[in-house]
Image (tube, coloured by chain):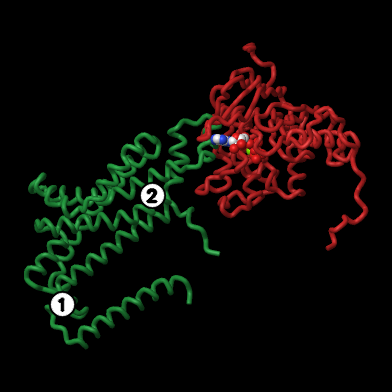
Amino acid sequence: MQTDPSHYMIELREVTHAYKTKAGPLPVLDNLSIKIPENSFCAVVGPSGCGKSTLTRLVSGLMKPNEGQVWLHNKLVTSPRPTVGMAFQNPVLLEWRTILQNILLPLEIVKSPMSKAEAVERAHHLLDLVGLTGFAEKRPSELSGGMRQRASLCRSIIHKPDVLILDEPFGALDAFTREDLWCTMHDLRAQEPFTCLLITHDLRESVFLADQVVVMSGRPAHAQYVLDVDIPGKRTLDDLYAPKAVEMLATLRHQIQVAQGRTTDEDAPPPPPKPARSQPIPGAMQ
Amino acid sequence: MNDTARKILAPTLFIVAILGFWEWAVWYNDLPDFRMASPSDLIPRYVQFWDLFLVKSWETLWRTVVGLGLAVVVGTLIGMVMGFSQFAREGLYPILVGFNAIPKATVVPIVALMFVGQHDFNTVLIAFMISFFPIAVSVSIGLSTLEPEYRDILRSLGASNFTIFWKIALPKTLPEFFGALKVAVTLAFIGTNLMEIVSPHGRGLGDLFDSGRISADYPLMFAVLFALAALGILLFYVVVFLERIFAGWAERSPG
Ligand SMILES: Nc1ncnc2c1ncn2[C@@H]1O[C@H](COP(=O)(O)OP(=O)(O)OP(=O)(O)O)[C@@H](O)[C@H]1O
Ligand SMILES: [Mg+2]
């Protein structure tokens, strides 16, 4: 196994991991390798239960892999690091704190050059960005699921981490808010660059946000397919309807079907986009 | 009717109705004092023994509170050990259950013999022994059932275990802790009185009760019961008040 330091911001080298369960070991990751350069954006998609959240826990140092290496910032990951920001799939907020206090929580752990006043100002600024203006003094129990997700997103970046790990952060959002937040993510990255690992189940989201999309296979998962998204310049939502993007989406959709085991033909070209259905579906009117 | 008015008026109304019925029932059945006292008999006793009531109530009160304080400290410590270590939990649990199952009335004479003459110490000890169990159990359950997600928020930033306990586990357990404290406060109160009555040593409301019993002064015995109820209510609502302050966030607004 290679041991020379990684030149990427995040690198997984042949990571294999199994959970210990009552019914014996459950293999989740199998020789998974991913390379993410500094300040680039990597989206990971894959079937439910294939090990995406496991991947985030390995990169953040919450767990150690059974085999293989996880590199972060040219160092082998052995324990969590304060330069990482993380938003979990289940956005737990501390019920006894206000939203503002929740967002400021990382700064109570991580040393930061920000003063208290600057931190509060930044928190309010982030709340504005995600559309939660005026909710700073509310309790988490007064927020909807999607609002809590957005608050947890603010918490993950309050300390200006250089690596951001997001586990389906937009999952509980309606389509319009979601698309707004995609644009917010682009703006944020333009203002303060960071390397991002995003788990998502939304293929359009992955293509719109990422520089590379990794498709994970079914469990035990490896990197089944890597798509380089080269849409140069500032992206707009209209780019998603350009022929190039449509083609990328079709490729990803096909790869997901392979990962789910619905198709075995890995090398088959993506099916051409189907014309919109104009006839009534037989039997649908009964 | 507004909220506060109702909160005062409703209990008052019920108390007056119950006392009225009691007074009527004793009068209607023509029961003599040595069979059943009526509320109107109690007032002369309070007037006659007012100073004694104050002194004895204070003795019962402070010994209960000290016993409870001890139960909070020791119970929380045991709960923490059991909450963080599965080994300690499995080892200590049967012992705690067994200890809790022993009727404390049987422990009173033993304690009184072990520490002869140390009446205040003995009373505090019994109050403590009878009340630490629910606190230990609730704290241990609160800590051991803390969802890993809560821990991960801080762990992913490299926080120490102590920081995680202080910022997450402790506040998160407070609602369970206060739930147990409400049970424990009543239990500690029972413990104090148990000592005062089973092993009479001239202190506390239990002593006043005992003198009522010896002199067959039924109205005095009932007067003591009411004083005990008043103290119990006082202690309970002090806990409720503290709960509002420290764990008020756990209360969902209705609707
Ligand atoms: N702590 C654990 N102990 C045992 N098994 C686990 C544990 N966490 C996850 N698993 C199992 O590992 C597999 C991968 O879990 P993981 O949460 O990484 O999936 P995922 O890709 O994030 O799924 P989803 O898209 O539904 O969020 C699942 O089959 C799950 O049952
Ligand atoms: Mg997941």
Q: Quadrant of residue A65?
A: top right
Name the chain under label 2. Answer: B
Q: How crowded is mark 1: few (under 14 residues within 10 Å), some or many (20 or more)?
A: few
Q: Element under label 2?
A: helix
The residue under label 2 is which amino acid type? Phe
Q: In front here: B163 or B147?
A: B147
Query: Taking the image as drawn, is residue B157 in sight?
Result: no
Which chain is represented by red in the image? A
The residue under label 1 is which amino acid type? Pro
Q: In which quarter of the image is residue A153?
A: top right
In the depicted structure, whether residue B189 falls above or below residue A208: below
Q: In front here: A78 or A238?
A: A78
In the depicted structure, whether residue A10 falls above or below residue B137: above
Which chain is represented by green in the image? B
Q: Element under label 1?
A: helix
Q: How crowded is mark 2: few (under 14 residues within 10 Å), some or many (20 or more)?
A: many
Q: Residue at x 63, y 30 (%)?
A: A55
